Amino acid sequence: MFHDDPPGASALPTAEPPPPAVEARLWRVGDLLLAPLLLGLGVMAGIAVGIVLARSGPIDRSDPAVALVFTTETLLVEAWAGILVLLLAARRGVTLRDLGLRTPPAWGWVMLAVVSAYGALAAYYLALYLLESLTGWDLAGLRQGNGIPEGIVRTPLILTVLGLALVVAAPIGEELFFRGLFYRGLAALTRPWIGLVVSGVAFSLVHANLSVVLPFAVIGMVFAAVYRASGSLWTSIAAHAIVNGMGFVAYVYGVAS
């Protein structure tokens, strides 16, 4: 005998399905090849702007107009990295939740990632110090870090654009690109540890700075591991924003170059 559904039964909440595991195949090989190509075109466009400026004479970053161009270029390239992933996701029918843009089960993952990131940097600089002390080699070139180019004038507008680029656009754009797309795709197509290593190395190489290749590769792996463990891309985005934000504050107050 059939019974009618109780009044209001259709309004009862249903359990939200869990997001796909990191190993679930969201991306295809073509996506992993197309995305770096399109990102590279964006970077080349920024380089072209620098070449045009250089043709009119030496680039003077103390000129507010020139500094604004370079900081805006940085903001746009970082934003382009994230936009690329969102466009590819829309093409594949991948939702934001599928990418991991969901509330993490615990925000403690963020602090774990931040502490691990600074631990990697501390270990790297300690290793350089010990190596110099033991061998007498001059390794100053490997201690330069990834600081903001010298000579950029610090007007309120330029600092605002630079802050948006480093603390907002870079964490969101780079985490979507290197963790949400690159790591996620490699982990599904090969093995999670391969995705961890390759995406971490790619993350470090894109900064085009020899002095940060090793520590940034480790940091990239840390962010990927936290993303995988928490199931939320917001954990690595938040950790990335905190690390960059602390560096930006140090720059603004003259603690770092």
Image: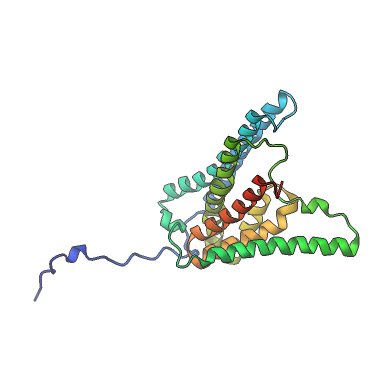
Would you say residue 115 is visible in this rendering? yes
Would residue 24 be found to the left or right of residue 130 on screen?
left
Whether residue 41 is visible here, answered yes or no, is no
Residue displayed at 52% across by 54% down: 181
Residue positioned 62% across, 39% down in the render: 43
Q: Which residue lies furthest to the right in this view?
A: 136
Position of the N terminus by quadrant: bottom left
Q: Which residue lies furthest to the front in this view?
A: 253
138 or 187: nearer the viewer: 138
In the figure, residue 53 lies in which quadrant? Answer: top right
Q: How many numbered circles are shown?
A: 0
Q: Which of the 4 image quarters holds residue 72?
A: top right
90 to the left or right of 165 = left
From the top left corner, tell me how far across and down residue 140 is, in percent: 82, 52
Asked if residue 225 is positioned above or below residue 81 in the image, the reply reads below
Indicate whether 185 appears above or below 151.
below
**Residue at the image position 73 percent from the left and 51 percent from the top:** 145
Q: How is the image coloured?
A: rainbow
Q: Residue at x 62, y 64 (%)?
A: 115
* Residue 154 % position (x, y): 65, 37
Residue at far left of view:
1
Judged from this view, the residue extending furthest toward the bottom is 1
Q: Which x, y percent locates residue 183? A: 56, 58
- Could you say which is closer to the camera, residue 190 or residue 75? 75
Where residue 102 appears, as percent x and y from the top left, is: 43, 59
Would residue 255 appear left or right of 95 to someone viewing this image? right
